[in-house]
Image: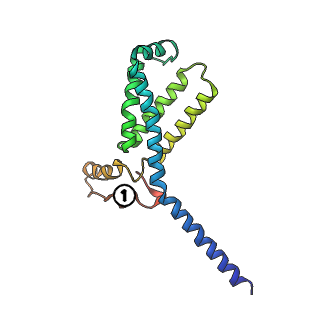
């Protein structure tokens, strides 16, 4: 006799859980935008610092940052260029995964290049890397240029009719943008 009441309680709890999940999923675009905004700011400000005093930047790449296989001047130029260009792409969500991959590699090179990186700095780089991995895995999100450009670009390249942006995103579990 207790079973109908128990089933009703479980049904209500299940519905409440589904409602909570839908609410959280509705926040995903805002969270992805916040992640893009944050990580773009970190790397772009670093690039601005480097171009503000180029001589010091080259000196740092000569004395402190030992980038394998590259001269200090080339490493400084490439790193600074990446720090200024890739964050702009990430901020707008244009070629977001490509830009996130580039900054992820830059982040790894930075960690490898500094011989005695203090633990707090290493933890900061690990956090930045985690944010970048999230952008690599889940993409820049619904509030991005990619969401509108890639379905149309795919249609041009593959020859299939363009997929509208809403259906291209698909259900939360299968989004590719």
Can you say whether 113 is above or below 130 in the image? above
> Of helix, strand and loop, which one carries label 1?
helix
> Is residue 151 found left or right of 70 in the rendered image?
left
Q: How is the image coloured?
A: rainbow
Q: Quadrant of residue 16?
A: bottom right
- Residue shown at 42%/52% (left/top)? 176
Q: Residue at the right extreme?
A: 1
Nearer to me, 160 or 23: 23
10 Å crowding of disc 1: few (<14), some (14-19), many (20+) = some
- Residue shown at 42%/51% (left/top)? 141
Can you say whether 175 is above or below 132 in the image? below
Q: Quadrant of residue 84?
A: top left
- Relative image position of residue 170 (x, y in whole percent): 41, 60
> Is residue 84 found left or right of 173 in the rendered image?
left
Residue labelled with disc 1: 168
Q: Residue at the front extreme?
A: 52
Q: Quadrant of residue 116?
A: top right
- Relative image position of residue 128 (x, y in whole percent): 52, 36
Q: Residue at the bottom extreme?
A: 1
Task: Report the number of discs.
Answer: 1
- Residue shown at 32%/49% (left/top)? 150
Image quadrant containing the N terminus:
bottom right
Can you say whether 66 is above or below 158 in the image? above
- Relative image position of residue 110 (x, y in whole percent): 51, 25
**Residue 70 visible in image:** no
- Relative image position of residue 127 (x, y in whole percent): 56, 37
**Residue 175 visible in image:** yes
């Amino acid at each position: 006799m207790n079973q109908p009441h128990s089933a009703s309680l479980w049904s209500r709890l299940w519905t409440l859980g589904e409602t909570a999940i839908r609410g959280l999923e509705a926040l995903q675009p805002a969270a992805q935008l916040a992640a893009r905004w944050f990580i773009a700011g970190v790397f772009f400000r670093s690039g601005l610092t480097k171009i503000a005093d180029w001589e010091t930047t080259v000196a740092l790449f000569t004395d402190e940052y030992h980038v394998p296989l590259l001269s200090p001047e080339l490493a400084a130029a490439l790193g600074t260029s990446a720090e200024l260009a890739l964050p702009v792409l990430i901020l707008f969500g244009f070629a977001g995964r490509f830009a996130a991959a580039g900054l992820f590699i830059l982040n790894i090179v930075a960690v490898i290049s500094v011989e005695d990186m203090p633990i707090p700095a290493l933890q900061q780089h690990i956090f930045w890397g985690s944010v970048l991995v999230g952008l690599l895995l889940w993409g820049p999100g619904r509030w991005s240029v990619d969401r509108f450009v890639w379905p149309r670009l795919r249609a041009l390249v593959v020859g299939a009719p363009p997929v509208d942006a809403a259906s291209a995103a698909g259900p939360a579990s299968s989004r590719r943008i």
